Image: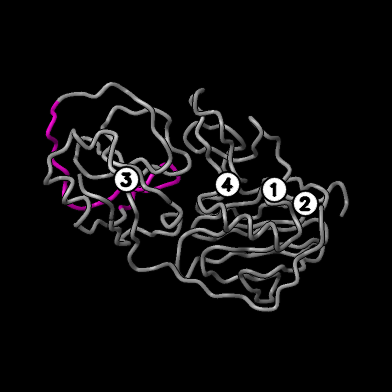
């Protein structure tokens, strides 16, 4: 591949960002991990095109992304069930795709799910910040969200595309179950609130994003009134703001917050594909 190989963004779509496996180890300086909301999906896309797993790709939310490649290359798209075209030819999710020089890749709106991850042989070669090329939409670290007309440089290919004969279909569940460990501030809530959290369905609200998923449903009553001094937050923290409805923090979460955290979700990956209206249930031990 030519050293000048690049991706030209003809249409960025609703939200397309550069992501890799994130920048762990900086929370003590107020920097969250960020990175792909489904790290395994990006790792798979990288393996399909012969990249090392930490290579940067694109995270595409709700499709609508149109890209042109200045040199012949290999790409792969994983994640949501979506229609793909290379020029006028339909293509498959979950397979390495040969793209000629000058060809246009179109990522359509997902039929199911919310986000797709695109890997290109050589990886997206934007300048790393604190060891990562990930865009953090809350702090602004890393590259800004992709815009129409952007040109993204590619690195040199590191390996051969993976031989894949079968594409396994995937569809997000209609209901997501999240295992939650109570604390550190579950004692700020009534026993009825804890029972409600663990036994009541919630739905994903329309204001959800890479920072967190806002849930709609019954409020969780507090046992302790008043303010809480700001304290540390982690990935998966279930914070309860003033309206009493839980908020699950995702990759671009803040590192501190002043509302009580009733619990922490063990794995937030299923929320990466949760559209507004998706049912969410928590389960775990009651206090």
Label 4 sits on a secondary structure element that is strand
Label 1 sits on a secondary structure element that is loop
Determine which residue is flagged by label 2: 122
Mark 1 surroundings within 10 Å by alpha-carbon count, few (fewer than 14), some (14 through 19), many (20 or more): many
- CA distance for labels 3 and 4: 31 Å
Check residue 46 for magenta coloring. Answer: no
Q: Does residue 42 appear to the left or right of 125 in the view shown? A: left
Q: Quadrant of the N terminus?
A: bottom right
Determine which residue is flagged by label 4: 17
In this view, 185 is above or below 62: above
Q: Nearer the viewer, mark 1 or mark 4?
A: 1
Residue at 43% across, 57% down: 270
Q: Which residues are magenta?
A: 205-225
- Mark seen at residue 181: 3
- CA distance for labels 2 and 3: 40 Å
Residue at 29% across, 38% down: 239
- Mark seen at residue 55: 1
Q: Residue 21: horizontal and vertical position, in percent?
A: 60, 45
Which of pointers 2 and 1 lies earlier in the amino acid sequence? 1
Label 2 sits on a secondary structure element that is loop
Q: Residue 151: horizontal and vertical position, in percent?
A: 71, 46
Q: Cβ–Cβ below 8 Å for labels 2 and 1?
A: yes
- CA distance for labels 2 and 4: 17 Å
């Amino acid at each position: 591949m030519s050293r000048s190989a690049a991706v030209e963004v003809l249409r960025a779509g609703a939200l397309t960002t550069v992501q890799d496996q994130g920048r762990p180890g900086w929370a003590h300086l107020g920097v969250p991990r960020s990175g792909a909301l489904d790290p395994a999906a990006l790792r798979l896309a990288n393996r399909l095109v012969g990249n090392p797993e930490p290579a940067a790709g694109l995270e595409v939310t709700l499709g609508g992304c149109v890209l042109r490649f200045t040199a012949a290359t290999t790409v792969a798209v994983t994640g949501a069930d979506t229609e793909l075209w290379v020029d006028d030819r339909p293509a498959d999710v979950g397979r390495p795709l040969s793209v000629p020089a000058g060809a246009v890749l179109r990522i359509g709106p997902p039929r199911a799910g919310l986000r797709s991850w695109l890997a290109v042989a050589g990886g997206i070669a934007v300048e790393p910040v604190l060891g990562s090329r990930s865009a953090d939409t809350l702090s602004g670290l890393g590259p800004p969200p992709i815009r129409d007309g952007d040109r993204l440089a590619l690195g040199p290919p590191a390996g051969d595309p993976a031989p894949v004969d079968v594409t396994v279909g995937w569809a997000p569940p209609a209901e997501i179950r999240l295992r939650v460990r109570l604390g550190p501030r579950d004692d700020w809530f009534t026993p009825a609130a804890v029972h409600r959290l663990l036994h009541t369905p919630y739905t994903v609200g329309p204001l959800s994003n890479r920072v967190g998923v806002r849930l709609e449903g019954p409020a969780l009553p507090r046992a302790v009134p008043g303010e809480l001094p700001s304290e540390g937050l982690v990935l998966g923290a279930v914070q309860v703001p003033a309206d009493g409805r839980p908020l699950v923090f995702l990759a671009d979460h803040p590192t501190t917050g002043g509302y009580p955290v009733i619990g922490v979700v063990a794995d937030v990956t299923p929320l990466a594909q949760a559209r507004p209206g998706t049912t969410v249930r928590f389960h775990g031990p009651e206090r």
